[in-house]
Image (cartoon, rainbow, N blue to C red):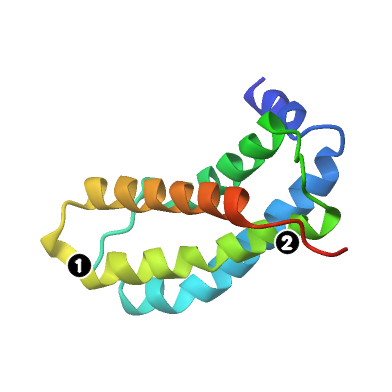
Amino acid sequence: MAGEAFILSLGPDPAGMLRIWGVHVMIGAFLSTTFVLLGRNRAEWNFLDLLAFLLPFATWHALGSIFSFEGKTLGNLAEPIYLSFGIPVAAAIRVVAGPRADKRLMSLSLVALLCLTATGIYLWTPALPE
């Protein structure tokens, strides 16, 4: 049931949005691998850290749905790619903070920061050429 709701929320072309999300996840995961592997002893990774791959994209897509991608072109479908470069930055911050920070609070804060970044990317990126 939740899976169906997620697919329906992707709009008229769910396969296209899933492909864009997949590229977003692959870039973010590939670039974050170094930080995750090198920092596995410094930071205790948990389920909340995985939300960094879903919630920022969902925020970007929700804004697009609310504003009907008004003033955007097909070139703007690259915006989630820009967003995927924030995931390794969040992973690096998580590793640098290490065991000093509360892991749950740090995870939620970084995901919230990525969602704010998604909002900024959506609102401040002008129409890109196709």
Pointer 1: what residue?
98
- The structure residue drawn at horizontal position 77% and vertical position 49%, both measured from the top left corner, is 72
Task: Give the SS element for disc 2.
Answer: helix
Q: Quadrant of residue 74?
A: bottom right
Task: Give the SS element for disc 1.
Answer: helix
- The structure residue drawn at horizontal position 71% and vertical position 29%, both measured from the top left corner, is 9
The vertical placement of 68 against 106, above or below, is above
Q: Position of residue 50 (x, y in %)?
A: 46, 51
Q: Quadrant of residue 125?
A: bottom right
Q: Are marks 1 and 2 in contact (CB under 8 Å)?
A: no
Q: Which is nearer the eye, 68 or 30? A: 68
Tag shown at residue 78: 2
Horizontal relation, residue 84 to residue 51: left or right = right
The vertical placement of 111 against 91, above or below, is above
Q: Amino acid at mark 2?
A: Ala
Point out the frontmost of discs 1 and 2: 2
In which quadrant is the C terminus drawn?
bottom right
Q: Position of residue 117 (x, y in %)?
A: 48, 54
